[in-house]
Image (cartoon, helix red, strand yellow):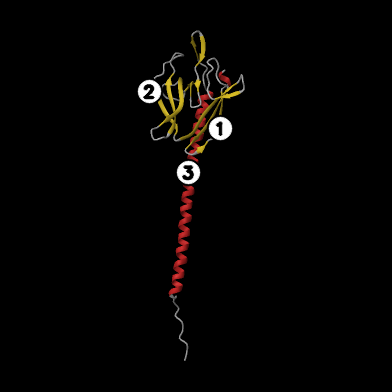
Amino acid sequence: MMPRPRSAGFTLVELLIALALTALVLAAAFAAFGLIGRSTDTATLLRDRSERMMLVERFLRDKLEGMRQVKRFDNGRPVVFFSGNSAGLLWVAPLPERPVGGGLHVLRLGPERHPDGRTDWVLEILPFQGAYTTFDWPAAERIVLLENLSTLRWQYFDNRTGQWLDEWTDPAFYPGRLRLFLGAEGQEWPVLVFALDHVR
């Protein structure tokens, strides 16, 4: 008896193995594409955060280091137009980049707490109308610099004592430097230092 020649097709077992291998390759490919997509999203998020950080830092440096030495008299004593504590500060600076209403403005920077527990970092701006300006803060222009703050702490350097203070209470002098500890959206920023030596 002559043996029967084998069919040139695949057996059922071979076909199942090929299908299983194809499914594994496709699953690995889809997982790789998903990882690439998530990596791209993460990179975009980090880039956006970094750009936001740079813009806010540049704006603050310009406005704080451009601070104007403005004094008023309180019971015959000169009082600087500056106040600050660990949560925020108030100062006078020019806003020449504004298309309308440029010139000196009073700026107040501090946290704004929401009922749901979120805290935003808000800059409020009023036109400076002389050393005895009264503050109508409800009418102020508001700019949200950062959302979802996790860390906010200012410190003030006293050039005479060489110490960092959590509150500036000296009515006769400006601090020499400001130091800011800041975190937002789960990311801690590098410590920022602003020089104010020229204001003295």
Query: Which residue is drawn at the image coordinates 50% and 8% (left, top)?
Result: 76
Instruction: From the top left corner, tell me how far across and down residue 152 is, in percent.
Output: 50, 31
The correct choice, above or below, for 82 with respect to 152 in the image is above
Q: Relative to 135, is 84 on the left or the right?
A: right
Instruction: From the top left corner, tell me how far across and down residue 79 is, in percent.
Output: 51, 14
- How far is the residue under mark 1 from the one under mark 2? 31 Å
The label shown at residue 8 is: none
Read off the residue under disc 1.
191
Relative to the observer, which residue lies in front, 76 or 33? 76
Read off the residue under disc 3.
44
Query: Which residue is drawn at the image coordinates 46% and 50% (left, top)?
Result: 37
- How far is the residue under mark 3 from the one under mark 1? 24 Å
Q: State which quadrant residue 12 falls in.
A: bottom left
- Mark 2 vs mark 3: which is more N-terminal? 3
Q: Secondary structure at mark 1?
A: loop
Q: Secondary structure at mark 2?
A: helix
Counting other residues with Cα less than 10 Å from the Cα at mark 2, is it few (<14), some (14-19), or many (20 or more)? Answer: few
Query: Which residue is drawn at the image coordinates 50% and 38% (left, top)?
Result: 187
**Amino acid marked by disc 2:** Pro
Relative to the observer, which residue lies in front, 152 or 175? 152
Q: Secondary structure at mark 3?
A: helix
**Amino acid marked by disc 3:** Thr
- How far is the residue under mark 2 from the one under mark 3? 36 Å
Kindly report which numbered mark, 2 or 3, lies closer to the viewer in this rendering: 2
The correct choice, above or below, for 173 with respect to 62 in the image is above
Read off the residue under disc 2.
138
**Amino acid marked by disc 1:** Val
Residue that protrudes farthest toward the bottom in the picture: 1
Instruction: From the top left corner, tell me how far across and down residue 127 is, in percent.
Output: 42, 19
- Mark 3 vs mark 1: which is more N-terminal? 3
